[in-house]
Amino acid sequence: MSDDAFATATAAIIAAGRRLDHFGWVPATAGNISVRLPDGTLAITRSGGHKGFLQPEGVIRVDLAGRPLRPGDRPSAETGLHCGIYRRFPDAGAVLHGHSVPVTVLSRAGTEAIRLEGYELLKAFPGLPTHAAAVTLPIFDNAQDIPHLQSVVEDRWAAMAEIPPGYLIRGHGIYVWGADMPAALMRLEALEFMLACEMETRRR
């Protein structure tokens, strides 16, 4: 893999971190961001640090098992969830994980999923050309055992007729992915808008 490819991925991750920070979706050390590199390895944010103030040294490389490729680098504990998405979806080129207020609040409601229906922004997702559609976002119980959590996610994917545009971890955050960073960002922004609307509707 060329240094240019890693530099390009790092720049995309830094820009995404600043955008997520602008919306308040990655407070403190929350969230993580990754990009699949041409050689199949990943560029991903280092453990800790504020994603709105990322510098190039805040992005490292790991293999598809989440192992750092340079001694001393420490990836996020949730790197395994990024790796699981890339393994399951060969077309995924970027993964975003944020901790917004709507995601955190709605995921704590005790349900197994959130259904989003009738929103104009559903058209942001491939295969949904009209607002007269619906998507279901599964919610998984939070766990510190990331391999186990990833296995639970994979079991749910296997049982679903259609793969959702993302998923929530209860009281924690959201994971989305896309073919590249712009696609992942569009998906996250669309979901965050609809989830904010859901929260406001339920509050009223």
Image (tube, grey):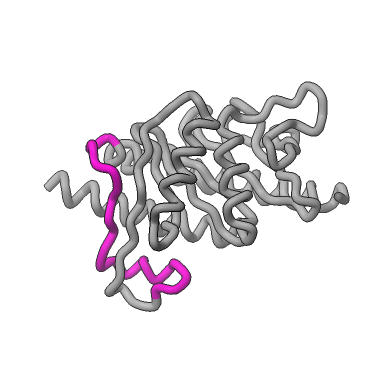
The magenta segment: 108-128
Q: Residue furthest left?
A: 204
Does the magenta segment cover residue 116?
Answer: yes
- Closest to the observer: 29 or 47? 47
Does the magenta segment cover residue 122?
Answer: yes
Give the x, y percent position of residue 52.
Answer: 56, 38
Residue at image location 23% in from the left, 36% down from the top:
110
Residue at image location 15% in from the left, 44% down from the top:
203
Residue 169, quarter of picture: top left
Residue at image location 49% in from the left, 45% down from the top:
154
Where 182 falls versus 97 (above or below)? below
Residue 67, quarter of picture: top right
Q: Residue furthest right?
A: 2
Give the x, y percent position of residue 32.
Answer: 56, 38
- Residue 96 at least partly seen: yes
Q: Tell whether 152 sits left or right of 53.
A: left
Q: Residue furthest top?
A: 72
Where 120 falls versus 164 (above or below)? below
- Closest to the observer: 139 or 154? 154
The number of discs equals 0
Residue at image location 44% in from the left, 51% down from the top:
157
Give the x, y percent position of residue 195.
Answer: 31, 51
Q: Tell whether 86 sits left or right of 73.
A: left
Q: Tell whether 139 sits left or right of 126.
A: left
Where 43 falls versus 172 (above or below)? below
- Closest to the observer: 7 or 107? 107
Give the x, y percent position of residue 112.
Answer: 28, 43
